[in-house]
Image: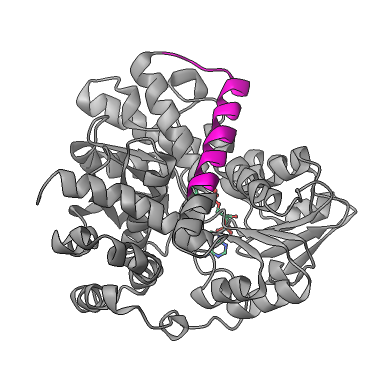
Amino acid sequence: MSDARPSITSTLPTLPSAVRDVYAQAMLRNPHEPEFHQALHEVLDSIAPVIERHPEFAEAGILERLVEPERQIMFRVPWIDDTGRLRVNRGFRVQFNSALGPYKGGIRFHSSVNLSIMKFLGFEQIFKNALTGQGIGGAKGGSDFDPHGRSSGEVMRFCQSFMSELYRHIGEHTDVPAGDIGVGGREIGYMFGQYRKITNRHESGVFTGKGVGWGGAQVRTEATGYGAVFFAEEMLGTRGDSIAGKRVAVSGSGNVAIYAIEKVTQLGGIPVTASDSTGYIVDDAGIDIELLKQVKEQDRLRISEYAARRPSARFVEGGNVWEVPVDVAVPSATQNELSPTDAETLIANGVLAVAEGANMPCFPGAIAAFQAAGTLFAPGKAANAGGVATSALEMSQNHSRQRWSFDDSETRLRDIMRNVHTAAFDASERYGAPGDYVLGANSVAFERVAQAMLAQGVI
Ligand code: NDP
């Protein structure tokens, strides 16, 4: 990550008049929520042409309702650490919009979690889920609990306490959580177990990202990372190009990053970086995916350990992965990890395409720089939609008590990402900016949600 982080508000350009009042009101009603403001701004900026073309949306107050979560829940999460000390964290679930289906969105455990971050993620999730075309609404949840350095017993006790409150707000037809930063298969197992005990129901469809042996779907673990690379492949395809032979920078070394790296390798590309909050590794020979999985998934160690075990790699402490020359970038760690300066560096190094594996990893100024330079750019709500889309496949399998094979599930994921790409690209053409995937993804997703809200009346 860059040392000099721009402030979020300083990088926001002005908004078109069709949406300015809604944004101004939302800023006033939700002060001190910079990430939420940033997400609102990005969406409102690109849907102004849709509002102008559809006056019925403005007349029905769709935007005013859309920017207000349907429900937001905050709760105390007390738990006992291994030394016997009582700890208290804060839990959240923001159920943003259910016009298209039950709420759906991940749970994040990270020390930075607050209401602003939950609302930005929940708001983005509405549009991402709409893009998948699978009948799911948008939500997000989490806690400021930091699992780093905690024993499995501590993580389990925390998850049980968290679920002792959350269970009453979720259900397979109400709200279906999944994983996100700090929440993988282990945490989902603990939360699902507590839900089952409290409710006395083995309700598989209440969580996605479950273990394959107890209701989980094939390819869910891989889906977000694989999907982001499929989306990059689709974008490159519009210019007669592909991932094969390309050097690719991936940031992060968690769920999304690991499987983005794996898919790049499978498509004949050369993934050369991975990172965590301590720094990054660069491996010009191409990242050894089995070693990366061993270090991060099995041994749960820092990314520097990869370089310690791999002669062709080096670790750059506190460094910024975007300084490495590459053809394709897949930011897959966290929000606001790629600054305008980072974008200029990537552009100067000849980057062809950027696909956001993470949610909102690029600052607005970085996105503007990529678009001005003609770099193919995919926003997270399109590029990382493969995760939630495969979660919806998991829900379908749970409801119908079916189990699809890995190959079948991956083919479905590939088709979904192709459809998401086509929908975003076609909408960018319809609204007069072919290849602007930010405009395309936001406008087609907004159209779908707005039509549903219009049909369902003022609720
Ligand atoms: P993980 O917890 O598995 O991995 C996150 C990775 O990013 C870790 O390497 C972590 O390093 C790094 N990271 C997180 N926060 C920071 C930070 N503040 N500074 C530097 N590095 C950081 O999370 P996921 O891979 O699941 O999620 C990554 C991104 O993808 C998030 O934006 C998430 O919302 C998004 N996403 C995830 C989906 C999924 O299916 N998992 C679906 C769609 C989007 P460290 O361990 O040092 O903190």
**In-front residue for pair 398/422:** 422
Q: Residue 414 location in percent, x, y? A: 59, 34
Whether 26 is drawn above or below 183: the answer is below
Coloring applied to the structure: one colour
Q: Residue 288 location in percent, x, y? A: 80, 44
Q: Residue furthest bottom?
A: 10
Residue 122 placement: quadrant = bottom left
In the rendered image, residue 444 lying in the magenta stretch gets the answer no
Q: Residue 357 location in percent, x, y? A: 57, 53
**Is residue 352 at all visible to an observer of this figure?**
yes
Q: Residue at x 35, y 79 (%)?
A: 15
**In-front residue for pair 156/69:** 69
**Is residue 141 at all visible to an observer of this figure?**
no
Residue 413 placement: quadrant = top right
Query: Image check: 39 left or right of 91?
Result: right
The number of callouts visible is: 0
Query: Image check: 5 left or right of 297?
Result: left
Q: Residue at x 37, y 45 (%)?
A: 130
Q: Main secondary structure of the magenta part?
A: helix
Provide the residue span drawn in magenta. Answer: 402-423
Query: Image check: 75 left or right of 291?
Result: left
Q: Residue at x 20, y 79 (%)?
A: 28
Whether 198 is drawn above or below 25: the answer is above
Query: Image check: 224 left or right of 155?
Result: right
**In-front residue for pair 371/402:** 371
Q: Residue at x 23, y 72 (%)?
A: 22
User: From the image, which quarter does the N terminus lie in?
Assistant: bottom right
Q: Residue 227 location in percent, x, y? A: 58, 42
In the rendered image, residue 407 lying in the magenta stretch gets the answer yes
Q: Residue furthest top?
A: 401
